[in-house]
Amino acid sequence: MEIFTDIRLGDCKEVLKEYPDNYIDLIITSPPYADARKNTYGGIHPDHFVEWFLPASEQFLRVLKPTGTFILNIKERVVDGERHTYVMELILAMRKQGWLWTEEFIWHKKNSYPGKWPNRFRDSWERLIQFNKDKKFKMFQENVMVPMGEWANTRLKNLSETDKTRDNSKVGSGFGKNISKWLERDMAYPSNVLHLATECSNKNHSAVFPESLPEWFIKLFTGIGDTVLDPFMGSGTTNVVAQRMHRNSIGIDILPEYYTMAKEKTRSVEYILFDKRSTYGETNA
Amino acid sequence: MEIFTDIRLGDCKEVLKEYPDNYIDLIITSPPYADARKNTYGGIHPDHFVEWFLPASEQFLRVLKPTGTFILNIKERVVDGERHTYVMELILAMRKQGWLWTEEFIWHKKNSYPGKWPNRFRDSWERLIQFNKDKKFKMFQENVMVPMGEWANTRLKNLSETDKTRDNSKVGSGFGKNISKWLERDMAYPSNVLHLATECSNKNHSAVFPESLPEWFIKLFTGIGDTVLDPFMGSGTTNVVAQRMHRNSIGIDILPEYYTMAKEKTRSVEYILFDKRSTYGETNA
DNA sequence: AGCTCTTATGAATCATTGA
DNA sequence: GTCAATGATTCATAAGAGC
């Protein structure tokens, strides 16, 4: 199967006009946080973040399939001792635009930036806000099941003691079967809290997002051959991961440096995959 | 030192009118979630939650000291497949009332109940929203420091080798003193993500809140002899904890069952403490 | 190969200084 | 006075070095 990786230079709200309606399966992105990257993106002021973002999200709504999902990674900054309200205002405004606010995942950043301040602790979480066009959307929960670690040992033991008794007393019933399924299972569905470390390498890019983050959502919301969009791609992490997972992808960024970097990274992955395929092909096929 | 525990029956926005301005050091509460406890509290519809809450928060703002803090434990419900927006609307409305939205802590509920739904995973976090009256407020960060763990031992040893060199080269400087402080430390400041298990006992109360939750915030934001308020006390967990920690406390609930239960629990704690004191007194003093 | 040990650094925040 | 730049603070992770 052929898949494509479109790396585009330009403003996403303009570039996306070239794409048809209901075309994308998953949009996942981390826009430049308000005022956070003044040096690289020119600095959107927190007070103007919503009006800046809405024309883009309007295009996202148009190109997304009705069964598709939009995951927005964002966190409000502290401004003058308070958390700014632009994220909440954005969610309210996007609902008026027609989006459904389905869920909010928490990304717990285990290795958050150190520091000590008189009024607050280290900020070690970010929002992963899920929007949809329709109440019915694609979700492949079984693809992101996690091994039951210690959690299982303590929790399942407790459950099993009570339930095994009931199991014995109801031998042959459907209930018993359910319990045994539970016991045999060594994988569990995750919750809406993700524990991932930020990546410490990759000095080139100012907004590093660990590969496991897009990977998780691509597994959860798309199948092979589906199409993923990152409208603020930065160095193209999402596209690299999508390519590796055999998903089509589109990445857009307004900065030439990022465009070049992402082009480079996705190309090199192609080569690597090609090399591996040929190497492995000799021994396996 | 004498401390008091006031358990009151009534509507908090009315009862609080009896208390003076700038009187409370910490307000911590978990209001009846919109529509979540229809059977016990009469069910506030999500669409009317904000207008229902604002008269109460106005009183909270009045009775709180300028150096005090208000911690609101809340999570939006899923209504018709979407997360409802009443929490965000409440934050925006409370800021207009004069509150500062200082921070949002995440309570990660490690043992949230397992379950499976077609469109979402287990909800294993809640918001702990911090509001203040003033940018300058009391905070005793050192009271909630956490052990650094095994890993810290190795790391600190490693650091010391590098830093001792620097120390030697700058003998007598303030820098050297800093390093020695580092070496002696085995505790680290926490972040804004709290990992607590929910309590599974206490089936009587419909909004169970583990004792460690009020305990953490009482340690962080109050000293001995300060006054804590829980305006939707439920079974009185906050007051029991405050009493045990030698803080004055006020608990208010509109339901006679909770009033009675909280009266009972705070009284029995008094007795237990008294018993312990007399018993231990014989052997120790 | 598998360990342990070492080092660099990540979407941070606040107070102070300078323009 | 307002706004921008600089310095101080200090935790968890992974990549790299060493054995």
Image (cartoon, coloured by chain):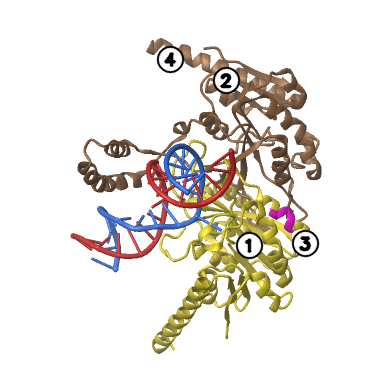
Chain colours: A yellow, B brown, C blue, D red
Nearer to the camera, B8 or B118: B8
Looking at the rendered image, the disc whose residue lies closer to the viewer, 1 or 4, is 1
Q: Which residue is mark 3?
A: A98
Residue at image position (72%, 22%) is B16
Residue at image position (57%, 16%) is B270
Looking at the rendered image, the disc whose residue lies closer to the viewer, 2 or 1, is 1
Q: Which residue is mark 2?
A: B269
Task: Tell me the SS state at disc 4.
Answer: helix
Looking at the rendered image, the disc whose residue lies closer to the viewer, 2 or 3, is 3
Chain letter of mark 4 equals B
Q: Do tag 2 and tag 1 residues touch (Cβ < 8 Å)?
A: no
Placement of C15 over or under A224, stated as above or below: above
Q: Which residue is mark 1?
A: A71
Q: Are marks 1 and 3 on the same chain?
A: yes
Amino acid type, callout 3: Gly
Q: Do tag 2 and tag 3 residues touch (Cβ < 8 Å)?
A: no
Amino acid type, callout 4: Tyr
Chain letter of mark 3 equals A
Placement of B75 over or under B235, stated as above or below: below
Across and down, in percent, residue B94 comes to: 71, 38
Placement of A275 over or under B41, stated as above or below: below
- Whole-Å distance between the Cαs marked 2 and 1? 48 Å
Crowdedness of circle 4 by 10 Å Cα count: few (<14), some, many (20+)? few
Across and down, in percent, residue B50 comes to: 77, 40
Magenta part of the chain:
A90-94
For residue B254, say whether it is visible. Answer: no
Amino acid type, callout 2: Val
Residue at image position (39%, 86%) is A279
Q: Are marks 2 and 1 on the same chain?
A: no
Q: Quadrant of the C terminus of chain B?
A: top left
Task: Tell me the SS state at disc 3.
Answer: loop
